[in-house]
Amino acid sequence: MESEFARNLIDQYGYLAIFVSMFIEGEIFLLAASVLVSNGFLQAHWVITYAAAGTFVAHMIFFFIGRWRGMELIDAVPFLRRHYPKANIVMDKYANWSVFICQYLYGMRLISAVLFGCSTITTIRFSILQLINCISWALLIYFASHGLGILATKVIEAVGLYGLLAVILLLSAVALLVYRLYAHHHISAFLASGREPSIEQTNPIEGRHFALEQLQYHIDLAARTQLPLSLLLLKVPAQTEAVLEGQLTYIATELCQQLRLVDIPARYDKQTFVVVAPSTDSKGARLAIKRLQASLLAHIEIAPTLEEIRIGMVAWEPGMSSGKMLDHAFNDLEPVSVSSKRPASF
């Protein structure tokens, strides 16, 4: 009686459950569905169809959420705030491959869809890539799950249930060892990006390339979303560059913190750092500069040389290119004021 009730329940809602489960991370549910297929409760072609359709719809919904309110979500979630600038640059340059790669990063499928929505990839392009991606993913995961189910059955027949558990533990230990030896360093380095000094901060050529890509991306985003955007420059005279090298890096990083940015400042040339401040208007940028000046008063070792440093700021306006923004910011360079008795010049 109970088995008949379960069969009726699966017959009525099984495929719908597969479709809805794709709005979470669907691998586990697709594995369970493959078991039901093996026992005759569901049909393989419909399982694959509903899994692919559910995944596609879920990705498109999260994509449009990213396009509609993505920046608000990014500002609210520290993990997204930390990684979205570089992630979006990668997505814009390698979108065809990154769509497929993100599909197989457990826990990142739906988050990546939000990031794609915030990027400059077109809706049509994303939809076509996702359609191919979701169908291939559903086929691969289903047949992999089906194959694992057959293998598990044979292992149980050979060594019993406890033998199967022992095999799973052994394979898990091997996978963990491989991860620790080969993958852990690279993943940790990626997660640390934006927090530790990098080549963009120490190498002017890499820094300029990164700054221009970052600035152009945010200009495109501001043009589409009408969100504010500011560009700030920190410049030190050539004759004091050796003395102020560490101090300039510190001040640029401190300015990013005052702007509540999670991305790094980039070295535009040997004397200049570029700070791109998305979602920051001119008023917010000037306020951040004033807070920077106030915070630097506590650092006595920096104060005597701060007058050597110049800060320039420009807010993006419709029609402004990255080159024009840089020109305005360079023309706006003014000395940092560190005296508490006189107002800041910004």
Image (spheres, grey):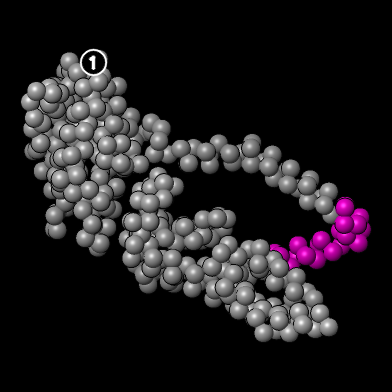
Depicted 158 relative to depicted 183: above or below: below
Is residue 153 part of the magenta span, yes or no? yes
Which residue is at the front of the view, 249 or 101? 249
Q: Amino acid at mark 1?
A: Ile
Judge from the rendering whether residue 16 lies leftward or rightward of residue 39; answer left or right: left
- The stretch of residues the image draws in magenta is 144-163
Residue 29, quarter of the rendered image:
bottom right
- The quadrant of the picture occupied by the N terminus is bottom right
Judge from the rendering whether residue 111 lies leftward or rightward of residue 105; answer left or right: left
Q: Which residue is mark 1?
A: 300
Which residue is at the front of the view, 171 or 206? 171
Residue 234 location, x and y as percent? 20, 32
Residue 101 location, x and y as percent? 52, 57
User: Which residue is found at the position 69% from the left and 78% from the top?
Assistant: 44
Can see residue 143?
A: no
Can see residue 186?
A: yes
